[in-house]
Image (cartoon, rainbow, N blue to C red):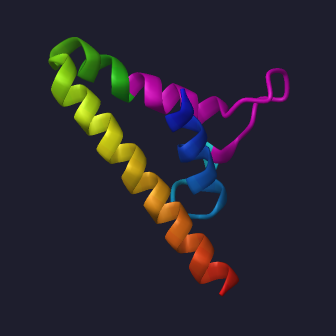
Amino acid sequence: MGVARIVCSMARTHLFFPWFGKISERFQTPMWATVFVTVAGVPLALLTDLPPLIDMVSAGGFTAFRCCSTKSCAHYA
């Protein structure tokens, strides 16, 4: 669930809703980001063929990484 950690990082840098950045005290994992990614991913996994789903996940991960890195570069420049 690496996407949940990306969502959590986006929330902590104010690119997404802040409550997605909440970390579980017990497990030290992004709690609400994991719930969000799971709820969004289950219907896609059940209703979509595998190759388009892989393409969407790859494109989404790249887009999220690009947003975070652009925001970080702008912040620290």
Q: Residue 12, image x and y in percent?
A: 66, 56
| Residue lying at 70% horizontally and 41% vertically, measured from the top left | 22
| Residue lying at 25% horizontally and 23% vertically, measured from the top left | 44
Residue 13 highlighted magenta (yes or no): no
In the image as oriented, which residue stretches furthest toward the right?
A: 25
| Residue lying at 65% horizontally and 30% vertically, measured from the top left | 31
Quadrant location of residue 46?
A: top left
Task: State the extent of the magenta-drawn residues as a range.
Answer: 21-39
Quadrant location of residue 76?
A: bottom right
Is 4 placed above or below 47 here? below
Residue 33 highlighted magenta (yes or no): yes
Q: Residue 75, image x and y in percent?
A: 64, 80
**Quick one: quadrant of the C terminus?**
bottom right
Is 70 placed above or below 47 here? below
In the image as oriented, which residue stretches furthest toward the top?
A: 46
Q: Residue 23, image x and y in percent?
A: 74, 37
Q: Nearer the viewer, residue 25 or 1?
A: 1
Side of 22 where 8 appears, left or right: left
In the image as oriented, which residue stretches furthest toward the bottom?
A: 77
**Quick one: quadrant of the N terminus?**
top right
Side of 24 where 1 appears, left or right: left
| Residue lying at 23% horizontally and 27% vertically, measured from the top left | 53
Is 9 placed above or below 15 here? above
Side of 64 where 18 appears, left or right: right
